[in-house]
Image: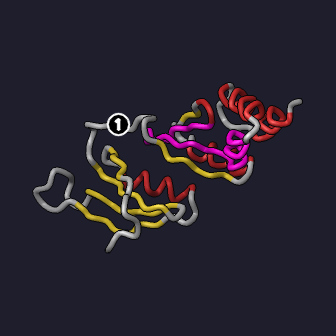
Amino acid sequence: MPANQKITPCLWFEGNAEEAMDFYFSIFEDGKILDVTRWGKGGMGQEGSVLVAKFQIAGQEYMALNGGPEFKFTEAISLSIDCGSQDEVDALTEKLTADGGEIGPCGWVKDKFGLSWQVVPRILMQMIQDKDQNRADRVMAALMQMMKINIKQHEEAYNQV
């Protein structure tokens, strides 16, 4: 199957790529598997288990590689989600941190596989990029004090006189 995008992020899992894809499909309704390559006889993995899979969520293609325990995810790479509302921020934060994930500062979360996500409302970026630097600075200061993002508190900081 030819690639629909030139660059595809490859996510390294420790033998649980199928579980991870199912987890992401439970969060993003439009998720689907595009292609799967399984280990054959004599491979490094169990015969029939996933070696690599190409999948899609929210229109973005990814590869999932069952690479083993050698490497772990770090916050140096994260997936940023553009959210349209507080309800969406709340729902995605809850779903992504389910079953062992964790909430981090500034709207970052880590899912149960260790992959970092930024759950960011669109309006926050608009406020931070405001030409009025005082407004932008107040919003950024509020953000630095938060774990899960609260749009109302950002709006209050933005509109402060």
Query: Counting other residues with Cα less than 10 Å from the Cα at mark 1, is it few (<14), some (14-19), or many (20 or more)?
Result: few
Q: Mark 1 is on which residue type?
A: Lys
Residue at the extreme left of the image, as rendered:
42
Residue farthest right in this picture: 161
The residue shown at (76%, 30%) is 134
Colour approach in the figure: secondary structure
Which residue is labeled 1 in the image?
72
In terms of depth relative to the viewer, which is nearer, 10 or 156?
A: 156
Q: Nearer the viewer, residue 36 or 63?
A: 63
- Secondary element under disc 1, as helix, strand or loop, is loop
Is residue 127 in the magenta section?
yes
Name the image quarter holding residue 75: top left
Q: Could you tell me residue 35's position as x and y percent?
A: 34, 68
Determine if the magenta segment contains residue 114: yes
Name the side, left or right, on which 85 lies relative to 66: right
Question: What's the residue at 37%, 58% (across, down)?
Answer: 8
Q: Quadrant of residue 61?
A: bottom left
* Image quadrant occupied by the C terminus: top right
**Horizontal side, residue 123 vs residue 72: left or right:** right
Residue at 53% of width from left, 41% of height from top? 99
Stretch of the chain drawn in magenta: 107-130
Return the x and y of residue 147 as percentages of the image width and height.
65, 31
Residue 90 at x, y = what percent? 69, 45
Q: Residue at x 85, y 36 (%)?
A: 159
Q: Is residue 107 above or below residue 67?
A: above
